[in-house]
Image (cartoon, grey):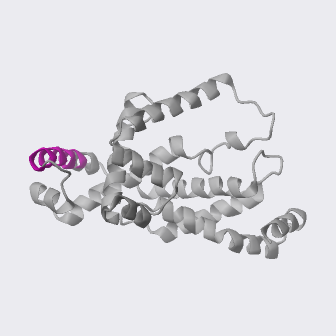
Amino acid sequence: MTDELWQKYMQTRDKETRDALIQEYLPLVKQIAGRLSLGLPPQVEEEDLVASGVIGLLEALERFNPAYDTGFKTFATWRIRGAMLDELRKLSWPPRSLYRRLRELQGAEQKLAHQLGREPSTAELATELKWSPEAVEQVYSQMNSYSLVSLESLLFAPAASAEGKEEELLPAGSFITPEENLEREERREVLTQAIAALAEREKLLLALYYKEELTLKEIGIVLDVSTARVSQLHARALRSLRNRLHAAGYMEK
């Protein structure tokens, strides 16, 4: 059915067929929004991501070229994700106070982990910092969102943002300079080394999220923790990756 719709749209470009294709791919938009909504800050709603994802889907329908060395679903996925990342980037810019509060939170984490011999809970961190549990979760949520946008944009998304060039979607025979290819390989190597240095549970979480594409709830079941804890662990893993990539010169602090 989808192939028939796509072939018809390529020939006619009529609104009725376009709308049918949008309905056909809407579950894909919602699936990507659900994955990117991991630990979103309060000012960002999943519906915002879905709306921007539909715009990305429309752009994909208008810009897809059969000469690209990829199928439409793959192309659309990258365009949808790129549009959502652009929306997240606009909505989740970190306040200046975030890094101060994050340093305080990290200090409390290290202190309590040493005292307790295990990772502290949100409630224990809140007591140590004299914050509310909601304030602790908000810091994790803000950092999670900001780090996720940065890393997805730089490394995890095969394509650039919605306004960037699609260097991996170019027709066969298109030229990528040796310098560009070398930089991409260097980024992959730095990321590989950064992931290898993570704690085993953090590596498992990233594998479940980025490779197996599990949801928050599914990851929580695998790790036997709450969804809030998954968000906390994810934020910690991304923070560690950001620090290492910053040290290597690939990301701003």
- Foreground residue, 196 or 19? 196
Judged left or right of residue 109, residue 21 is right
Q: Which residues are magenta?
A: 102-116
Instruction: Name the quadrant containing residue 11.
Output: bottom right
Does the magenta run of residues contain 110? yes
Q: Residue at x 83, y 51 (%)?
A: 66
Residue 40: tell me if it is visible: no
The N terminus - image quarter: bottom right
Q: Is residue 51 above or below residue 211?
A: below
- Foreground residue, 252 or 232? 232
The C terminus - image quarter: top left
Residue 135: tell me if it is visible: yes
Magenta part, dominant SS: helix
Residue 162: x and y, percent? 62, 51
Residue 119: x and y, percent? 20, 51
Does the magenta run of residues contain 210? no
> Residue extending furthest right?
11
Q: Residue at x 9, y 47 (%)?
A: 115
Q: Residue at x 83, y 46 (%)?
A: 67
